[in-house]
Amino acid sequence: MPTEVILPKVDMDMDAGLLAQWHVAIGDHVEKGAALFDIETDKAAMEVEAPASGIVGHIVAEAGSRIPVGQVVAWIYAENEKIPDLPPGGAISGDTGAAEADAEPQAGSRKEVAEVPQPTAPAARDSDEAGTENHSGDPRPRATPAARAAARKSGVDLGRVAGSGPKGRIQADDVARLQPVAAGPSTAEAGLSESAPPVDWAENQRPLAMTRRKGRAKGYPVLLIHGFAADAAGWAPLEKALGDEREIIRIELPCHGRSPLVRTGSFREFTRMAVRAFDDLDVEQLHLVGHSLGGAVAAAIADIRPRRIASLSLISPAGLGPEIDGATLHGIARATRTDSLAPWLKRLGADPDAISHDFAKAAMMARMEPELRAAQVELAGILFPDGTQSFDLSAAMARVEAPFKIVWGRQDRILPWRHALRAPDVAGLHLLDKAGHIPHIERPEAVALPLLENFRTGEVPAYQR
Amino acid sequence: MNAPAKQPDADIRELSYSEAIREAMGLALERDERVVLMGEDIGVYGGAFQVTGDLVERFGADRVMDTPISELGGAGVAVGAALTGLRPIYEFQFSDFAALAMEQIVNQAAKMRYMLGGEASVPVVFRMPAGSGTGAAAQHSQSFEAWFGHVPGLKVVQPSTPEDAKGLLLAALEDPDPVVMFEHKLLYKMKGHVPEGWYTTQIGKSAIRRHGKDVTIVASAIMVHRALAAAEKLAGEGIEAEIIDLRSVRPIDGETIIGSVRKTGRLLCVYEGVRTLGIGAEISAMIAESEAFDFLDAPVLRLGGAEAPIPYNPDLEKAAVPQIPDIEAAARRLARREV
């Protein structure tokens, strides 16, 4: 059986994407994980990787065309597999749905033709490789038809859903749990009725979720560590601004994204898990980039594993002073619906109006798992008790020998930019105007500029600097 | 064994399954002089399972005819009689013996209307005592519903209650084409409410015997009652099974089954015929092809007869077909998402 390649869903609210460019041609041999094509959405551009190794037998979508999410764009055949003249099922186009009229009730012929395979974000495939969710190596998550239908309807990415059925199979109610309540009871009622569920803390040391995007040129990979209550998806704007030269590796912190819900007693324990993930990387040297809490974690990693750090770039990092807007952290961690999340999100950026309802909705979509929220509420209490940063990385930062830059937004209301003044003298400071706590989302190009400079410096041997 | 969905009531007349069939045949013999009964030992002896009983005394040997010990011959006479204007009901002693009459049923009765361009029809009814549980061993215990259901031109019904036995037999008599009615031998003594007078039960329409939201169980004949007993136990665990009595194998009622699976997302098919290539395969495939597919939240399960002849040993005979604990366990596994 050939493996189908579909246009994946890479944004929560995306239903189609521009297939910008093919990296392969018919007849090419590809390795699993190799870049197949580029897609661009309203928010992000990225490479889509081959779901299997083999020969590209058919390409059924042209570069430059807009393709619905989930539509097959190519077929990959095994080495010894005979490649037919026509792709399986003929050339699939997006408008076959209206081809057949309704037949008798049990025939359901329309569905047979029209239903496209369930979209799976490439990130989910990456996580397969990382062994975080699926262990089967299946190209698609194991899910029942009802779960797939529910995910299609609500735009939930099955790659993000933890299945409760046998072998981790995603059931319909696993998806239903992740769906935001569109027109439910009022916020006040929900606040009363919804109590935090008990968290089923992961006991075994499952590795942290990690996703990778291949780079086009030489240069050390860039390792991105997100902030509190964020996840790897938040890096998309900066990744675009950083260009496609270097490989991008994204780690998701414990209790975030697809990483396990591991209970933490302290910042030290929390960091240890990130160090373990770092040690598992088969990369000699890399550029370390961290935002906020992830910035503190990055500084700690750089302190523990200095020889593998080509450069260190921290964006609005934690760990340089006691103040932090604890109310916002808890507000975000607790929010169960878009309406209660949006006001807190608006405090993240310099311009509250930049946080649209759709942005908040997409953010809420990624946080619909009650256990994840409960785990993050507890984590906030441990790392930031009484609205205070309980850890100080200024000494660690002083020991950094690699090229080191700190980028901060002057309108940051979560961590005051003046904390940057406590940074050691080796660090270059870049204080951005018109940026709040998330400059990598608000002004990705302005953040990318000093970061790329930092990377280039880090790739020059130390004796030549 | 109680009649499903209906509790005995002082005002409600109860008959056994075989009495209900006899009443239907009596009504038909009274009402329509074209109706004749044929079969081995259905006259003075009253039928192998005493279903025709005293009908020969009431209507005479011209209309309740003992036929020679030749199923092929008897069935052929019945088909010929139907072609020439009579409304015969031919009784097999055991449905297993229908194998001897396949030519008449499959190649003649089922094909005649088609091959004669609609100029002729064969309004014959074949009554077939079927199923295991009587200690009658491998050649007298089989369930061939799926065999006959595979033949276009035939209609195949499988009543599970006395009320339906009468209603489906009268519907079969009114039908202009050949109808095969499977009567489970263990049901003959089952009592239940049977309305008086002439009424018909629609061929091709199943019945929901119990409503539930967690799992759909499609069963036929005796399996309906076993499924209901299993559902009763499951209800104590909070699992609400919806029981569909298939009633008709051909045509099959897709609408009811698809609607139920859309609701429950889980399907268990229970039937006594050999599991492979049986009724459950057809229902499973029908669901996979239907819009109910998108509502499936678990694999479809089938419980059917063992891949073996029905054994004579009573314990093995029981083990060869689905029993109440089997249905209970399978439905529980589905509801608890263990499959």
Image: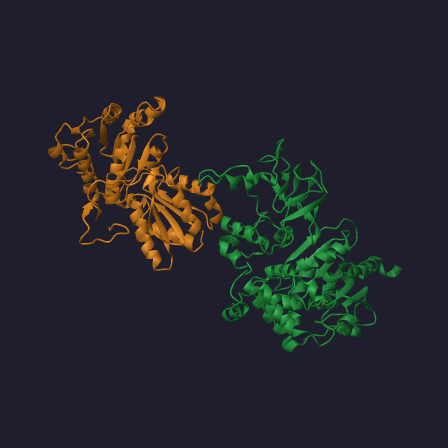
Chain colours: A green, B orange
Residue that extends furthest to the top in the rendered view of this protein: B116
State whether residue B136 appears in this view. yes
Viewer-nearest residue: A367 or B320: A367
User: Which image quarter is the N terminus of chain A in?
Assistant: top right
Q: Is residue B41 above or below residue A44?
A: above
Left or right: where does residue A175 sit relative to residue B314?
right
What's the residue at 59%, 53% (across, down)? A157
What's the residue at 58%, 66% (across, down)? A373
Residue that extends furthest to the left in the rendered view of this protein: B57
Left or right: where does residue A223 sit relative to residue B183?
right
Percent position of residue A113, x then y: 54, 39
Residue A461 picture quarter: bottom right
Percent position of residue B163, x then y: 24, 44
What's the residue at 35%, 29% (across, down)? B153
Residue A267 picture quarter: bottom right
Viewer-nearest residue: B288 or A207: B288
Residue A86 picture quarter: top right
Left or right: where does residue A398 sit relative to residue B292?
right
Percent position of residue B170, x then y: 24, 37
State whether residue B39 appears in this view. no
